[in-house]
Amino acid sequence: MRLIQGLNRLRHLRLELDPELAPYLVTSPHDDFESVLKSYGSVDSSWISGFATLAVLLLIVNCVLVGVVGGLIAVNLGADAPIVALVGIVSAIAFAVAAGAWFSREIGRVAGRFVSVVPAPPTAPAQSSEAVASTSRRPDSASGPEDHPSRTSSAD
């Protein structure tokens, strides 16, 4: 999450230097917790999209491994096949529940210590770069490069 926060800060800097790039950015230029989650793809997205994350893939692989190890332990203790399967399933589910509890606790801990340098405006939720671009354009004004501080020529 810290790396995504850093990328959002770089997007913000790039938009300060050249606001015309806003339509080309697909994630938020803000680095608050909500904006970082939105950049990660976990806010306002379908619950099914969560299965496309690396964390869920690793959780599934680890659950299968824990289930296999639980089943192997049951086999070594001389259990019958239905008991081996039951031990494997129960151990995999128990691991998934424990990992989910740990993950939700970690997210809460990280959210509590999250330091934002360029947060989204408090009056509106974290905006996408498309929304920022549409609010930053002024079609009724004919502002040129001299009207924007980042557009001034260094030859002055």
Image (cartoon, helix red, strand yellow):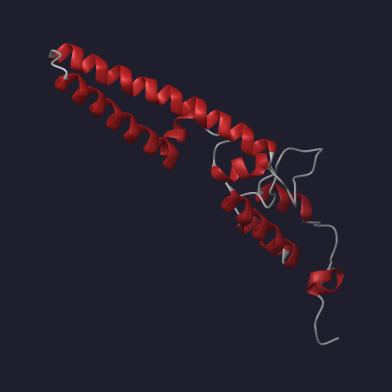
Viewer-side residue, 41 vs 83 = 83
Q: Quadrant of the C terminus?
A: bottom right
* The quarter of the displayed image where residue 63 is located: top left
Residue occupying the far bottom of the picture: 155
- Horizontally, is 148 left or right of 75 in the view? right
- State the residue at coordinates (15%, 14%): 79
- State the residue at coordinates (28%, 32%): 65
Viewer-side residue, 22 vs 15 = 15
Res 78 visible: yes
How many numbered circles are shown? 0
* The quarter of the displayed image where residue 55 is located: top left
What is the x, y in percent for residue 149?
84, 70
- Horizontally, is 98 left or right of 139 in the view? left
24 in relation to 35, above or below: below
What is the x, y in percent for residue 127?
70, 44
Viewer-side residue, 116 vs 102 = 102
Viewer-side residue, 143 vs 112 = 112
- State the residue at coordinates (86%, 69%): 147
What is the x, y in percent for residue 11?
65, 58
Res 53 visible: no
